[in-house]
Image (cartoon, rainbow, N blue to C red):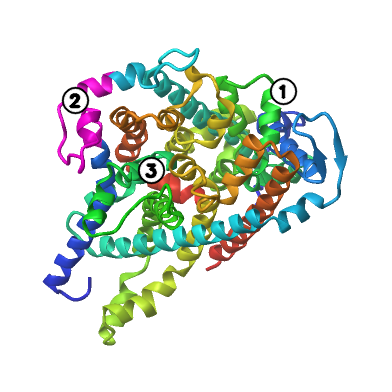
């Protein structure tokens, strides 16, 4: 879509675009190009000498069992966060769409965790699950189950998934509720007159109409789990124990800033870049479809 | 609801109440923890009712939450709340300002390289900090912006989503208004300030709410570019307070700081809920 009526000025549009483009070039494009460049170089940690090594850094990554494990952990983590956050949000949104009394209050009470930073959400759950003083390990202990996410990798994964999903539920809830409220009531009433019960109405009428929202949210949730959960991991487990929660984004940070492996970290950055580009393309292609839906 | 089934209504309310409780429980426990002395807190099980150390803990968190280290002075959450506020406001205002003029240029002018500019802005969507973390750090270090507010704010203010949102808003402004303005002899900037800005007011407000929360909750970026204790944001400070090695972390102070860190964005979301939902569903779609 384009404007028919425009202004004529040779200089002004460039002036208006300058701030945005300057920030984009200096802090986005240039560093990204540097990352691409470094990913094919072998550099010593002090940056004194470097050598062109073609795709050796990527080959090293592909052969690194730690990286492959991190890739697997990230896939599992994102899948679990998205599944948990989406299903619980959808369930709550269906209930909230149904109530008449107190709907606004429930909505407010369910929305606000979105305002809490992922790292702070991590700290809250860390307190609840602290092996020595937390309430839940105490309750679990009373049932004969020992909780210590500092030594048990599976428990650590469970904890970061829970903390990451907890915050995302509000976001999904807002979108599901908006999606549900946009479904014409006449469709549901027509299905009811035809004798469809609540479950059948949900699966044959509501859920298909909600599919665009669901698909959009799946992409957004995966992006969230990939990138925005850095704070959760850094605050709760720091990638441990023994790399059980070392997701890709955390590994890039750890290898680059703490391990000072510049080439390897840059190669990991490039892999992440490819993942974001793929996700963004999916997201935008889908939005294109949604407009014509 | 189509059928009238009272038990189903009760069930619905029960599910929602449980949902609300699950969502609120961690916050409640945090609040309780922030009102006890450490000694009471490490008792097993930890207390479930607020204690009497509310004033003491919050005072300590505000004035000296991050204790003295080697060569560093004790520093309180008050300073970090201020840092976070500067960062959040800077990011929100900066993003809106540069995006709205960029969108104005793209929608209301025809000029060479217009689509190039559009695509350059679009690319930023695909380059979150996480994928270019080391080189960006190096650029900021070379510019001498480590441990400064400019370093915290400027690298984050490029925004494709905000630019696209304003583009949508501008495309919906009727052409007749532009024609009328031009007939009346208004230049582009006059038109921008007198017509475009007032018409985009609600969108700006909605975007501001979202971006304030985005800025306040930043984590990776402030983590890597601030080393000076007095430049930490509140979110980073909490993590710093917990990383005490083998010492017993002062959980009551950490939790008081966490409450303080949550308060501003939560107040913003709850009081401006309508704008928040509008901003969220408007920018992401």
For marks 2 and 1, give the CA distance: 46 Å
- Which residue is disc 2 drawn over? B53
- What residue is drawn where x is 70% and y is 21%? B143
Residue B43 is one of the magenta-drawn residues: yes
Side of A28 where A59 appears, left or right: right
- Which residue is disc 1 drawn over? B142
Secondary element under disc 3, as helix, strand or loop, is helix
Side of B120 where B158 appears, left or right: left
Residue B242 is marked as none
Q: Say whether disc 2 or disc 1 marks the residue closer to the N-terminus.
A: 2
For marks 3 and 1, give the CA distance: 34 Å
Side of A224 where B12 appears, left or right: left
Residue A254 is one of the magenta-drawn residues: no
Check the residue under mark 2 and report the chain it is in: B
- Which residue is disc 3 drawn over? A121
Q: Is residue B82 above or below residue A228?
A: above
Task: Using the image as rendered, state which of residue A67 and residue B2 is in the foreground.
Answer: A67
Q: Position of residue A130 (x, y in %)?
A: 33, 44
Magenta span of residues: B31-59
Check the residue under mark 3 and report the chain it is in: A
């Amino acid at each position: 879509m384009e404007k028919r009526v425009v202004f004529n000025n040779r200089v002004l549009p460039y002036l208006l675009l300058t701030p945005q483009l300057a920030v984009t070039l200096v802090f986005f494009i240039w560093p990204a190009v540097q990352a691409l460049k470094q990913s094919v170089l072998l550099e010593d940690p002090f940056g004194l000498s470097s050598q062109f090594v073609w795709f050796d850094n990527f080959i090293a990554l592909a052969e690194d069992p730690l990286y492959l494990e991190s890739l697997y952990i990230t896939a599992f983590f994102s899948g679990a966060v998205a599944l948990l956050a989406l299903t619980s949000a959808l369930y709550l949104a269906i209930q909230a769409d149904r109530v008449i009394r107190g709907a606004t209050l429930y909505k407010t009470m369910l929305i606000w965790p979105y305002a809490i930073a992922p790292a702070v959400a991590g700290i809250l759950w860390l307190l609840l699950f602290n092996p020595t003083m937390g309430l839940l390990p105490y309750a679990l202990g009373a049932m004969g189950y020992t909780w210590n996410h500092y030594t048990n990798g599976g428990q650590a994964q469970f904890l970061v998934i829970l903390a990451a999903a907890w915050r995302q539920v509000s976001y999904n809830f807002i979108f599901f509720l908006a999606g549900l409220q946009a479904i014409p009531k006449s469709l549901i009433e027509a299905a009811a007159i035809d004798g469809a019960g609540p479950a059948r109405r949900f699966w044959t009428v509501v859920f298909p109409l909600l599919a665009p929202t669901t698909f959009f949210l799946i992409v957004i949730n995966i992006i969230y789990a990939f990138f925005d959960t850095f704070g959760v991991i850094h605050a709760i487990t720091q990638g441990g124990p023994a790399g059980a929660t070392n997701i890709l984004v955390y590994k890039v940070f750890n290898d680059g800033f703490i391990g000072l492996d510049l080439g390897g970290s840059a190669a990991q950055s490039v892999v992440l870049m490819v993942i974001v580009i793929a996700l963004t393309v999916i997201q935008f292609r889908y939005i294109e479809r949604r407009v014509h839906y | 609801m189509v059928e009238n089934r009272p038990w189903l209504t009760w069930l619905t309310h029960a599910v929602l109440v449980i949902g609300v409780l699950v969502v609120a429980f961690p916050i409640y426990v945090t609040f309780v923890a922030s009102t006890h002395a450490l000694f009471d807190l490490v008792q097993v099980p930890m207390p479930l009712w607020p204690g009497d150390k509310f004033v003491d803990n919050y005072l300590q968190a505000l004035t000296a939450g991050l204790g003295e280290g080697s060569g560093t002075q004790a520093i309180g959450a008050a300073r970090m709340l201020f840092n976070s506020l500067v960062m959040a406001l800077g990011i929100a205002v900066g993003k809106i300002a540069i995006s709205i003029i960029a969108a104005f240029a793209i929608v209301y002018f025809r000029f060479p390289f217009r689509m190039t500019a559009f695509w350059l802005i679009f690319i930023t969507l695909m380059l979150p900090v996480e994928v270019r973390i080391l080189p960006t750090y190096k650029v900021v270090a070379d510019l001498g912006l480590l441990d400064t507010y400019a370093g915290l704010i400027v690298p984050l203010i490029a925004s494709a989503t905000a630019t696209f949102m304003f583009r949508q808003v501008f495309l919906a402004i009727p052409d007749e208004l532009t024609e009328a303005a031009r007939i009346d002899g208004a230049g582009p900037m006059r038109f921008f300030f007198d017509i475009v800005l007032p018409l985009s007011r609600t969108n700006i407000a909605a975007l501001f709410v979202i971006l304030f929360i985005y800025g306040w909750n930043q984590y990776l970026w402030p983590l890597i570019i601030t080393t000076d204790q007095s430049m930490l944001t509140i979110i980073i400070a909490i993590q710093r307070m917990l990383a005490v090695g083998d010492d017993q972390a002062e959980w009551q102070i950490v939790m008081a700081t966490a409450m303080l860190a949550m308060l501003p964005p939560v107040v913003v979301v709850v009081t401006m809920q309508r704008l928040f939902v509008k901003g969220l569903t408007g920018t992401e779609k």
